[in-house]
Image (tube, grey):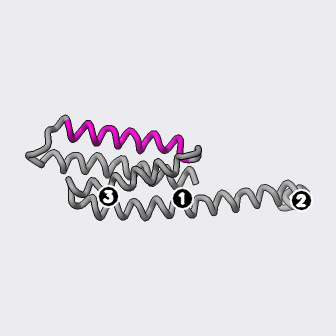
Amino acid sequence: MRTLCSSTLIGEFFIIGFAGLVAMKDADLTTSTVWTVCGIAMFLSLLLCGVVTRPGGVALGWALQIALVLSGFVVPMMFILGLLFGALWWASVHYGREIDAAKARFAAQAAAHPSDTADAA
């Protein structure tokens, strides 16, 4: 799960940065405001890569997904990109857990039947 979720979060890191560049064109927003908000969001996306497998990590990831969708009120394209990355986040969590479960089953089978794996090598 960690690999899939981290890949999604790294993609979001770049999307947030590009959205910041677009948001800078808004005359109502100051450059410092845009980069403070984007910097915090980018930092959180990197931080979540390290804590995604810890308790609450996935929930924090969902909070970031919601924030991405809501950023569409500033940069309208973020509604679409936020929904796209929300779907990627769901897939990363869902299929990542399935892969982790399959790896655990394989490891349990290998531990139960060590001679089968030795013969295969």
From the top left corner, tell me how far across and down residue 61 is, in percent.
Answer: 46, 50
Of the residues tagged 2 and 1, which is closer to the observer? 1
Few, some or many residues within 10 Å of mark 3 (<14, 14–19, 20+): many
Few, some or many residues within 10 Å of mark 2 (<14, 14–19, 20+): few
Please indicate whether residue 35 sits to the left or right of residue 47 in the image: left
Residue 121 visible in the picture: no
Residue 113 visible in the picture: yes
Mark 1: amino acid: Val
Of the residues tagged 3 and 1, which is closer to the observer? 3
For the point 12% across and 48% down, the residue is 25
From the top left corner, tell me how far across and down residue 39 is, in percent.
Answer: 31, 38
Q: Residue furthest left?
A: 27
Identify the secondary structure beneath mark 3: helix
Mark with earlier residue (3, 2): 3
Please indicate whether residue 119 sits to the left or right of residue 26 in the image: right
On whether residue 19 falls in the magenta region, the answer is no
Mark with earlier residue (2, 1): 1
- Give the magenta-colored segment's residue range: 33-52
On residue 113, which mark appears?
A: 2
Few, some or many residues within 10 Å of mark 1 (<14, 14–19, 20+): many
